[in-house]
Image (spheres, rainbow, N blue to C red):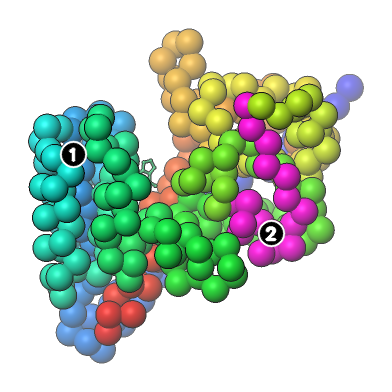
Amino acid sequence: MEDRQAVIIDGKALALKIRTEVAAEVSEIVSKTGRRPKLCVIIAGDNQASKVYVRNKKKACEDCGIESETIELDGSITKEELFDVIDRKNADKSVDGILVQLPLPGGIDEKEIIARIAPDKDVDCFHPVNVGRVFTGDPVFLPCTPAGIIELLKYAGVTIKGANCVVVGRSNIVGKPVGALLLAEDGTVTTAHSKTKDLKKVTGEADILVAAIGKAKFFTKEYIKPGAAVIDVGMDRDEEGRLCGDVDFDDVVGICGAITPVPGGVGPMTVAMLMKNTVKAARIHG
Ligand code: GUN
């Protein structure tokens, strides 16, 4: 019988520490240049979850001393109208970062919209140029959620070098880029997904497991190698409508070595890394 108790990795505390460091950097930039870093967040339609995320980003900007502007657009907006908004913000020298909250209303090609953002203002690190830089190992910005995951692992004292890292999920926002960052840290990376054969066998060999599939409490202890570090990227709802992750926390906590909770794990780190990217953009813009 296992009675090991996992380390709960406190993403909220680490995010707060990073945001405090960012605030100090912002003060330094303002006193040196007389200009305050600025983030422009664009949201179209009324996806409730997106509205919460956008509100969190605005609040984080306030806490860090970053100026923010939220542009709320109707769900019926066309691609051309959205292009016009992005073009104006690309040309606006007071704006350092532009973020288009996803998902976009139906019918709008997200890839085309992302590609319209000036790469030097792409603080989400979604533009193909910035994604390419991440994969070739010379990034300008780091993708927010994946970079937050690396920070969480380091904070928990988890060794990535040589570790068997299994990422489950292959999205452009999380699965693919977190694989690239783990590889850059000398991890041995496997990306698994819905078509993977014998998923339990694959994840059962993971020293580091990143769960990013969007299925509530999917990963039970049968999927976990004893002592593994488990990073839960899920933002799901359980049968009672409560926020939970892709990992069955209560089932897994007794067997893994370290685990991120939901909420309070990866989520706050994504926002903290966005703040870091915005400061990076401000430094580039001088
Ligand atoms: N939708 C879900 N996650 C994200 C994110 O990190 N950035 C943006 N822009 N949209 C999202």
Viewer-proximal residue among 33 and 72: 72
Q: Amino acid at mark 2?
A: Leu
Viewer-proximal residue among 107 and 55: 107
Residue at the location (76% across, 34% down)?
A: 203
Report x, y in % for residue 214.
51, 28
Marking on residue 44: 1
Q: Is residue 261 above or below residue 280?
A: above
Report x, y in % for residue 200.
77, 26
Report x, y in % for residue 182.
66, 56
Residue range highlighted in magenta: 178-194
Dividing the picture into quadrants, the one containing residue 5 is top right
Residue 65 shown left or right of residue 127 in the figure: left
Report x, y in % for residue 263.
47, 35
Q: Amino acid at mark 1?
A: Ala
- Can I make out residue 260 in this image? no
Viewer-proximal residue among 48 and 240: 48
Q: Is residue 92 above or below residue 114?
A: below
Q: Quadrant of ligand 1?
A: top left
Marking on residue 183: 2
Residue 44 included in the magenta stretch of the image? no
Residue at the location (51% across, 33% down)?
A: 234
